[in-house]
Amino acid sequence: MIKLNQKTRNQLWWLIISVDYTYSRIAIADHEINGQTLTLWLEDKQDYKNTLDECLQLHIPVSHLTKLIKAENMNSYEGTKMHPTKKYVYTTQIPISSPMHWYTNDASTTEQQWAREALLKSILTQLVETETYSYELDF
């Protein structure tokens, strides 16, 4: 679960409401990884901004991207292995490399984009589900 400060939650809510809860209208205008932080600049696809300063800036710890890549098996493929001592063949997920190494060195530009979009979708889904749930409990 990603913790967001109140200001960021309010800005994300404003963006979600402005796109009528249609996540596919939210575009990642740009991204940057600095050390331990992934920064995404978000905008509405039907209301493109002229500069990044006008976009919503979302700072996410890289550890959350790493967890998502691992959970979604983005850095592995399904293959077969032979058990070393019992000599039977079984199907398993075979890792390509560590999640961040895969993201920065092995993944194509499209795969990197899919990872960022999946992370954004999980954050938006978490926000809507937790805020709606906590709102229902307030009654």
Image: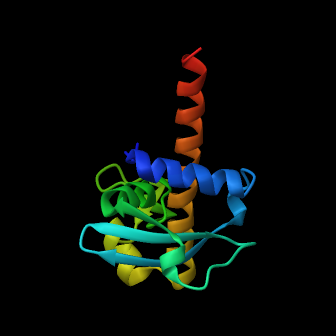
Residue, far left: 35
Measured along the vertical axis of the image, is residue 114 above or below residue 8? Answer: below
Horizontal side, residue 130 vs residue 26: left or right:
left
Which quarter of the rendering shows the C terminus?
A: top right
Residue 122 is at least partly visible in this image: no
Measured along the vertical axis of the image, is residue 78 above or below residue 3? Answer: below
Q: Residue sitting at 24 percent across and 73 percent down? A: 35
Observer-nearest of 46 and 25 = 46
Which quarter of the rendering shows the N terminus?
A: top left
Measured along the vertical axis of the image, is residue 91 above or below residue 54? Answer: above
Query: Which image quadrant is residue 49 in?
Result: bottom right
Measured along the vertical axis of the image, is residue 96 above or below residue 106? Answer: above
Observer-nearest of 122 and 88 = 122
Q: Position of residue 122 (x, y in %)?
A: 54, 51
Residue, far top: 139
Q: Residue sitting at 58 percent across and 36 percent down? A: 129
Observer-nearest of 39 and 9 = 9
Q: Residue sitting at 41 percent across and 81 percent down? A: 106
Observer-nearest of 7 and 86 = 7
Q: Position of residue 100 (x, y in %)?
A: 33, 70
Q: Position of residue 80 (x, y in %)?
A: 48, 61
* Count of numbered circles on the image: 0
